[in-house]
Amino acid sequence: MFGNSHRILLGTSACLVILLIVACGGGAPAATPTPLGPPGETPAAPPPAATQPPAPAATQPPAPPAADLQSRISDSYNRTVGLTDAGVVLGSFHIEMSGSDPIWNAETSQVETKNWAMTADFQGDDIHLVYTSDGETTEGWVIDQGKESEKWYEMVGGQVQESFLLPLVWLNVLTPIFPLVVAATGPTSQGGESIDGRAAEKYGVDSADAAPGVMGMVGGFLNITSSRGTVWVDQATVALLKTILDYEQKFTDPEKPETVLGTGSGHVEILVTRVGQVTVQLP
């Protein structure tokens, strides 16, 4: 059940990244044609290339094209939590996430705020998580995530029981994907920093800096009108190590998408620590 949900949402995220690449990418420059003489004459050989002194060695690698950088940032969170074919690329780690999401209350016709927090330990395909929202806390375990032997367990009344509801709680781990995808449309390199001892690439991200047309395509699809913040990506694995994002979202009438019912602000924070130092097992 949950594996299908993963694939559907991952497919959506991948499509968004492809749209960004298509919007911002460009082709290689056209080759210069060799001039031809009058009919019947043999074309003249091109003049020899001028001798040039060797170029100095680069002091740092060139920045990747904008489309590649967008993809690198957009997909970094998926690589952290194992939502790609590569699985959990960091091996084992501890992650802390928190946020406030705008939600539309159809009963009151008002935009409300949902505050949430999640901590989780990952060890390969095994996860121990604690999720809190609206004053309620759920503790659970995922064993063999993504495999045929996948099992879900929840702590109920002090006892660990197999759970069919925990996958719905775990879906909240997908919350940061869309604000990150939108913010990544406008990336700016800010050098590097160390996050809990790991070398990380630091990027400012702001949809206001997106290439023309990209936000209309991506933001319109997600109803996120702006997203901005800072992202730290692991240099070795291209996994997200830290991010702080603020975003704006609009809510529209399902029958009349051009009618905006309300707007709200959201916030997301993520921090990864203890890479390679975590073990997960059922109590």
Image: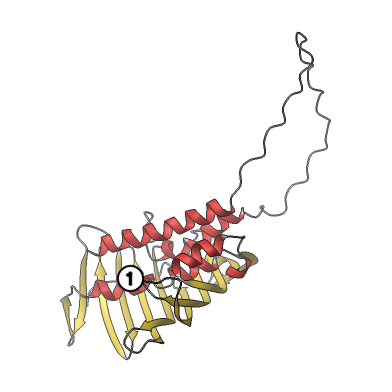
Query: How busy is the neighbourhood of tag 1: few (under 14 within 10 Å), some, or many (20 plus)?
Result: some
On the rendered structure, is 214 left or right of 137? right
User: How many numbered marks appear?
Assistant: 1
Residue type pointed to by label 1: Thr
Q: Quadrant of the C terminus?
A: bottom left
Q: Quadrant of the N terminus?
A: bottom left
Q: Looking at the rendering, which quadrant does residue 15 occupy?
A: bottom left
Tell me which residue sits at (64%, 65%) in the image.
188
Residue 226 position (above or below residue 44): below
Colour mapping used in the image:
secondary structure
User: Is any atom of residue 105 visible in this view?
Assistant: yes
Instruction: Say which residue label 1 marks.
Output: 279
On the rendered structure, is 53 left or right of 265? right
Q: Nearer the viewer, residue 29 or 150?
A: 29
Q: Looking at the rendering, which quadrant does residue 49 occupy?
A: top right
On the rendered structure, is 276 left or right of 234? left
Q: Secondary structure at mark 1?
A: loop
Q: Position of residue 210 (x, y in %)?
A: 60, 64
User: Is any atom of residue 181 visible in this view?
Assistant: no
Tell me which residue sits at (51%, 77%) in the image.
247
Q: Looking at the rendering, which quadrant does residue 34 occupy?
A: top right
Q: Position of residue 111 (x, y in %)?
A: 42, 85
On the rendered structure, is 166 left or right of 233? left
Q: Position of residue 139 (x, y in %)?
A: 27, 81
